[in-house]
Image: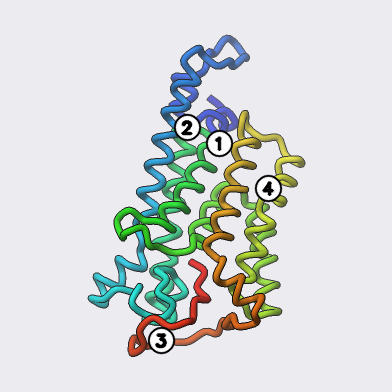
Amino acid sequence: MTFAQLNAFGLLGFKYCIDKTGEELAFTQNALTIYIIAAVLCAVMSYFLGSMNFAIIISKLKYKDDIRKYGSGNAGMTNMLRTYGRAAGICTFLGDLLKAVAAVLISRLLFGDPFGYIATLFCVIGHAFPCWYKFKGGKGVAVACAAILCLDQLPFVCLLIVFILIVAITKYLSLGSIMSVLMYPLFLDAFYSLHPYPMFSKPVATICSVLITCLILYLHRDNMKRLLNKTENKFTFKKKGTRSDKITEDKNDEN
C-alpha cells in the first residue's frame, strides 16, 4: 500500500472496501455499507472529542469556577485569556488544537482523506454544542483552524494571512474570523483545482467546508450585528483579566 492509497482509503478502507487486482483498485460490493458505517462512527467520535471543552475543564479544575459566568460567557480561548490570563488562554488553545488534530488524524488514518473533513465538521459542532455542558460551548474557530492545518496546509496559510491582515488593520478578531471562514470554501476549491485529490475528497470537502462556514457564521451572528452597528469591541492583549465582573455585553470571543 502506497502513501497515496493510504491517504485516499485509510487502513480499514484499503483492507475491507477495495478489490486489489494487480495495479487496479475497485470498490467491493459491500464498500458503500462499510463507508456509511465509517462515516457515522467518524462523526460520533469527532463530536464527542469536540465536546471536550478545555475552557470549562481548566476553569473548573484549576480555578474552581466556570468560565461561562464571566466576561462574554463564551467557553473559549479569548474569554479564558481575558478572565484568567495568558497561561489559561494558551492551555485552552492547545487543548482545542489537540482534540481537533486527534479527530482528523484518527479519521484519516482509519478511513481515508474524505473522512478528515467529516471529522472537522463534527468536531466543530461538538465544540459549539457540547453534550457534556448543556450544549453551550465555544464558537469553533480555534478547532476549525487546527483541523484545517492538518488537512490542507496551503489553504490554511492563505486563511491565516487573511485573518492576520484584517485583525492588524481593524483590531476586530470577529471580523478576521468571519472573513477567513467565508474564504475557506473558495481557497479549498482553488487548492483542489490545482492538485490531484483522492477519490470522493473534493465533493466531501466542498460540502463540509460550506457547512462549517455556515455554522461559524451562525455562531458569530451577534458579532456581525455589533460590527454593523459599530459597537463591536476591538481586541487588545491583557496580561491578566479579572473575575470581579460577571457576564458583560462584551462578546467579542472567537473560540
Quarter of the view holding residue 69:
bottom left
Q: Is residue 129 left or right of residue 222?
A: left
Q: Are marks 1 and 2 in contact (CB under 8 Å)?
A: yes
Decide which of tag 1 and tag 3 comes sooner along the chain. Answer: 1
- CA–CA distance between discs 1 and 4? 13 Å
- CA–CA distance between discs 2 and 4? 21 Å
Residue named by callout 4: 188
Q: Nearer the viewer, mark 2 or mark 3?
A: 3
Q: Amino acid at mark 4?
A: Leu
Callout 2 secondary element: helix
Q: Nearer the viewer, mark 2 or mark 4?
A: 4
**Local crowd size for mark 4, using a 10 Å CA cut-off: few (<14), some (14–19), many (≥20):** many
Q: Amino acid at mark 2?
A: Phe
Which circle marks residue 111 in the picture? 2
Which circle marks residue 202 in the picture? none
Callout 3 secondary element: loop
Residue located at (50% from left, 73% from top): 253
Residue named by callout 1: 114
